Amino acid sequence: MAAYFLRLTGIYWRRWGDKGNRLNLASGTGFIRSMAGRSVIIGVEGCARAAGRFDEPADKLYNEGLYLLNTKKDAKAAAKKFEEVDRQHPYSDWARKSLIMQAFSYYQAGAYDDCINTSRRYVTLHPGSPDAAYAQFLIGSSYFDQMPEISRDQERTDKAVQALEEVVRKYPESEYAVAAKRKIEIARDQLAGKEMDIGRQLQNAHNYVGAINRFKVVVTRYQRTRHVEEALLRLTEVYMALGIVEEAQTSAAVLGHNFPESRWYKDAYALMQSRGVEPNESKGSWISQAFAQLKF
């Protein structure tokens, strides 16, 4: 994951000459692009200063953070160093740059809550910055990396979807929108899986109304996930158990129409035949309407 984000954001490092430990940021993509082609060791002219003397120059603190992050592989220490830039030079452009690097460092360290809080602060303070898209992406990725297994509460999975959808909605042209969409698909599949897990438990307990409600969520909200085929089969089974044959026929028919080669359809068709009926779609059914505009 670390290598992926280094490639994604274009963070590449190299020693620059033989004079000391100066580090230069090589050309890349993402939020680092604005610094490509020029040394990060620059003067502090043009940076707004708070009253009084600083403990250390902003550029020195910043480059120490880069050194800790890249050479020492100590992301937490790097985050603290970038935080010092913000503390000692709060009105400088270095503070803005350090804030996004602080968020990235926390992500690299697996300190997800700190990454989320820092990234949110960046988005709030610098909503028009080109780096705002990356900060929002870090929020979603931090939740995404904490998604639990299906049997557990999916609050963080839901938050991952919400945060990543913000990337797509607010920054559709950014390079992070594509990666956000991929993660959204995975997270939504997880949420659908959770609904199926609960629905199957309710069905096995003969709580058919409760089971229908869970399977309905999958059919109406998560139609493009891999779970929708099974959800339609389970609806067929539950409606047949309740004696609501027309809805069962519709569920089986919609399953067969959209997924004719599915093993779940074969089971649904066999169930229909065992009861002496055939799949038959009722256009007025909520199941039919849910799929009316959908194209796979």
Image (cartoon, rainbow, N blue to C red):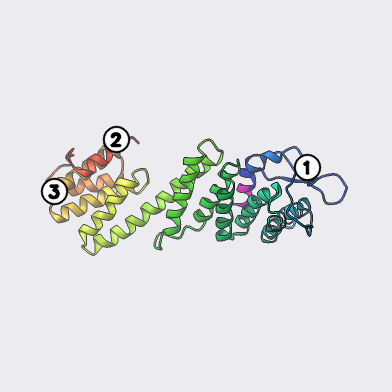
- At mark 1, the secondary structure is loop
The span picked out in magenta is 1-5
Residue 28 appears in the figure: no
Tell me the residue that label 3 is attached to: 245
Q: At 17% across and 46% down in the image, what residue appears?
A: 247
Cα separation between marks 3 and 2: 24 Å
Tell me the residue that label 1 is attached to: 39
Q: At 85% across and 44% down in the image, what residue appears?
A: 17
Is 4 one of the magenta-colored residues?
A: yes
Q: Is residue 158 left or right of residue 203?
A: right
- At mark 3, the secondary structure is helix
Question: What quarter of the picture does the C terminus occupy?
Answer: top left
Q: Amino acid at mark 2?
A: Gln
Cα separation between marks 2 and 1: 54 Å
Of the image marks 1 and 3, the number of the one nearer the N terminus: 1
Say which of 42 and 124 sits in front. Answer: 124
Of the image marks 3 and 2, the number of the one nearer the N terminus: 3
Q: Amino acid at mark 1?
A: Ser
In the rendered structure, find residue 293 and report the number of the disc placed on it: 2
